[in-house]
Image: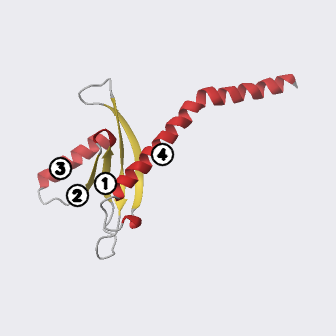
């Protein structure tokens, strides 16, 4: 009986000590995602219509200083326009370190600009 109790206590200790940082990181990621969604909805015609998919937190070493880590949120957003119709999913990326959000629909009039936006999103979001 003592062995069972000790085994259970050992499992609980392992869970608390080793998995607690993992759960804290998941909670932090959820908070970042919720903040990104809030920021993304800010300038929409109908913020309540916003639908999100493929939203994730991306961490990468900073380009100029690899000892620093950049944490960004990337995903896709669909919302209604002035006519009440959904416009289709567009990529977005939120850069908390710059307090900046970018929505990209892939429909710029200048093809070279489309290519550069795609390169930027691919680099930041790891696609």
Q: Nearer the viewer, mark 1 or mark 4?
A: 4
The numbered mark at residue 106 is 2
Sequence-first disc among 4 and 3: 4
> Looking at the image, which residue is at 46% across and 45% down?
31
The correct choice, above or below, for 29 with respect to 102 in the image is above
**Quadrant in the picture for residue 99:** top left
**Can you give x and y, in whole percent of width and height, for residue 118 in the image?**
23, 49
Q: Is residue 8 left or right of residue 70?
A: right
Of badges 4 and 3, nearer the viewer stands 4
**Horizontally, is 24 left or right of 11 in the view?**
left
Q: Are marks 2 and 1 in contact (CB under 8 Å)?
A: yes
Discs 2/4, front? 4
* CB contact under 8 Å: marks 4 and 3: no
**Mark 3, residue position:** 115
Q: Residue furthest bottom?
A: 83
Estimate the spatial distance between the alpha carbons at disc 2 and disc 3, rounded to whole Å.
9 Å
């Amino acid at each position: 009986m003592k062995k069972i109790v000790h085994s259970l206590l050992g499992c609980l200790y392992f869970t608390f000590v080793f998995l607690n940082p993992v759960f804290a990181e998941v909670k932090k990621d959820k908070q970042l995602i919720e903040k990104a969604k809030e920021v993304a909805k800010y300038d929409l015609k109908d913020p309540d219509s916003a639908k999100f998919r493929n939203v994730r937190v991306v961490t990468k070493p900073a380009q100029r200083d690899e000892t620093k880590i950049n944490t960004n949120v990337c995903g896709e957003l669909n919302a209604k326009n002035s006519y009440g119709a959904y416009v289709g999913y567009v990529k977005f990326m939120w850069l908390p370190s710059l307090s900046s959000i970018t929505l990209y629909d892939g429909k710029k009039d200048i093809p070279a600009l489309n290519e550069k936006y795609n390169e930027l999103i691919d680099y930041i979001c790891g696609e």
